[in-house]
Image (tube, rainbow, N blue to C red):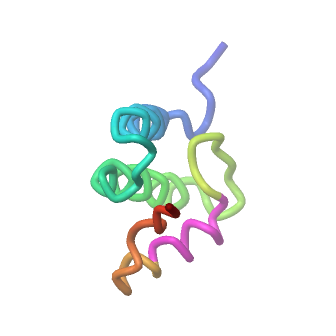
Amino acid sequence: MSEEVGSECKPHACAIQDCLQSNGYNESKCTKVIDELYKCCKEFYEKNGPEAQSVCCPKFNLLQTKLKQRLLGKIDAELLK
């Protein structure tokens, strides 16, 4: 079976899971790997169009929102205590 479309971002998605598990699910410790996934997904949509689908990437519109939030400095989810 051929490689699934969008699977080029899978290593980044797996890296996020590893990072979160290693850091008690504190997203602020995993900013770099999250940014790497978003970069990969942005390139995926640029190559395949906004209607493309990947199990590793957020939907196109959500990715756009996340990228805008990061530009505004709203990088990480807040950890509830």
Residue 17 rendering spot, x and y as whole percentages = 46, 36
Residue 43 rendering spot, x and y as whole percentages = 43, 56
Quarter of the image where one finds residue 39:
bottom left
Residue at the bottom extreme?
72
Magenta range is: 59-67
Above or below residue 39? Residue 53 is above
Residue at the top extreme?
1
Above or below residue 6? Residue 76 is below
Residue 23 inside the magenta-drawn segment: no
Main SS, magenta region, reads helix
Q: Along the line of sight, which residue is nearer the eye, 32 or 19?
A: 19
Above or below residue 45? Residue 76 is below
Q: In this view, does 18 lie to the left or right of 50?
A: left
Q: Along the line of sight, which residue is nearer the eye, 34 or 77?
A: 77
Q: Along the line of sight, which residue is nearer the eye, 16 or 68?
A: 16
Q: How many labels does the image show?
A: 0
Residue at the front extreme?
81
Residue 67 rendering spot, x and y as whole percentages = 45, 73
Residue 53 rendering spot, x and y as whole percentages = 68, 48
Q: Which residue is drawn at 71% across and 60% down?
A: 51
Give the position of the N terminus as an image quadrant. top right
Q: Is residue 32 left or right of residue 70?
A: left
Above or below residue 47? Residue 62 is below
Q: Residue at x 45, y 32 (%)?
A: 14
Q: Along the line of sight, which residue is nearer the eye, 54 or 79?
A: 79
Q: Which residue is drawn at 41% across and 67% down?
A: 76
Residue 66 inside the magenta-drawn segment: yes
Q: Which residue is drawn at 41% across and 41% down?
A: 24
Quarter of the image where one finds residue 27:
bottom left
